[in-house]
């Protein structure tokens, strides 16, 4: 008769192992279970995927999202590192979660070397390999969650702000508050927000923010 071991386990290690196991399962779902059959042109079209961060079932329907290549969850804004060279290629081998760490603006080049600020874009950073990417916001993305990401990004440490700058990514800050708010909620909303009590960011009270990492030593 075998005796049961009474050795106590580390709960944190157990939960972390379970979380990584779920991530690997979601990777297979992303690649296999949520694809349509190949069409006449030989390409495979995705129907949807399960978010590796929050478990939400995401549709990739262009009619609902307004984008050709859905690459993040509309509920939590987390993504997965599946694209390598361009959106939709699905050639990346990393497959780690990609964390939304801030917002930037799409720059639209104009004639005579002038540039005008474009639409809001999400900045994602891979928690596995550290790759940074810029992604379009979809029509069905939760505007409140995006605004929360913007507020949290105001607390990014100088190290990360410099890293983004070195990569040529302009992180939106407190001076861009009206641009962010108006694009997310409309000008009527921003007028109503400003008139009663104003929108002022107290940068002295910001909580320092460091992006997550799944690899030891990446930070």
Image (cartoon, rainbow, N blue to C red):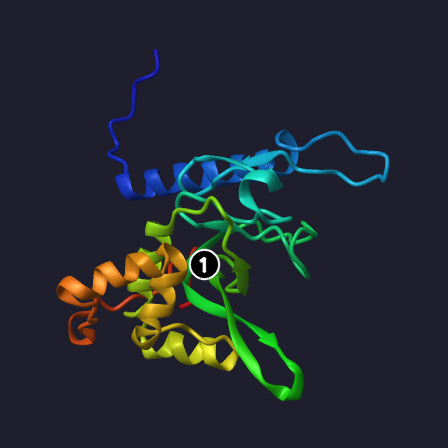
Instruction: Please tell me which residue lies in front, 51 or 24.
Output: 51
Image: 9 above or below 72: above
Q: How many numbered tags mark residues here? A: 1
* Residue lying furthest left: 197
Kindly indicate the quadrant of the structure image that contains residue 6.
top left
Residue 172 location, x and y as percent? 39, 72
Please indicate whether residue 217 sits to the left or right of residue 41 in the image: left
Q: Is residue 210 above or below residue 90?
A: below
Residue wearing tag 1: 215
Q: Residue at x 33, y 66 (%)?
A: 153
Q: Is residue 168 visible?
A: yes
Q: Quick one: label 1, few (<14), some, or many (20+) residues within 10 Å?
A: few
Residue 18 against residue 117 in the figure, above or below = above
For the residue pair 4 and 26, the one nearer the viewer reads as 26
Location of residue 18 in the rendering, given as x and y in whole percent from the top left corner: 40, 36
For the N terminus, the image quarter is top left
**Taking the image as drawn, is residue 60 in sight?**
no
- The residue drawn where x is 56% and y is 53% is 81
Question: At which x and y percent is residue 12?
Answer: 29, 43
| Horizontal relation, residue 43 to residue 185: left or right | right
Q: Furthest-top residue in view?
A: 1
Under circle 1, the secondary element is loop
| Side (left or right) of 142 relative to 82 | left
Quadrant for the C terminus, please.
bottom left
- The residue depicted at 42 percent of the width and 57 percent of the height is 100
Q: Position of residue 89 (x, y in %)?
A: 70, 52
Q: Is residue 212 above or below residue 14?
A: below
Q: Nearer the viewer, residue 141 or 3?
A: 141
Q: Please tell me in which quadrant of the rendered image residue 186 appears.
A: bottom left
Q: Residue at x 14, y 62 (%)?
A: 196
């Amino acid at each position: 008769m075998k005796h049961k071991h009474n050795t106590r386990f580390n709960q944190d290690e157990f939960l972390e192992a379970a979380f990584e196991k779920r991530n690997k399962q979601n990777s297979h779902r992303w690649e296999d279970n949520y694809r349509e059959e190949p069409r006449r042109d030989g390409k495979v079209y995705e129907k949807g995927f399960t978010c590796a961060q929050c478990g939400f079932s995401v549709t990739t329907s262009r009619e609902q999202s307004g984008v050709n290549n859905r690459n993040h969850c509309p509920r939590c804004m987390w993504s997965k590192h599946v694209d390598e060279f361009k959106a939709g290629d699905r050639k990346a081998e990393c497959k780690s979660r990609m964390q939304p760490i801030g917002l930037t603006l799409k720059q639209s080049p104009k004639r005579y070397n002038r540039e005008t600020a474009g639409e809001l874009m999400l900045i994602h950073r891979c928690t596995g390999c550290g790759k940074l990417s810029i992604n379009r916001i979809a029509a069905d993305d939760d505007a409140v969650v995006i605004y929360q990401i913007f507020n949290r990004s105001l607390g990014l440490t100088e190290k990360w702000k410099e890293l983004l700058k070195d990569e040529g990514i302009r992180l939106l800050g407190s001076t861009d508050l009206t641009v962010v708010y108006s694009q997310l909620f409309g000008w009527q909303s921003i007028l109503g927000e400003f008139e009663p009590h104003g929108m002022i960011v107290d940068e002295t009270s910001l909580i320092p923010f460091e992006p997550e990492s799944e690899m030891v030593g990446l930070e």
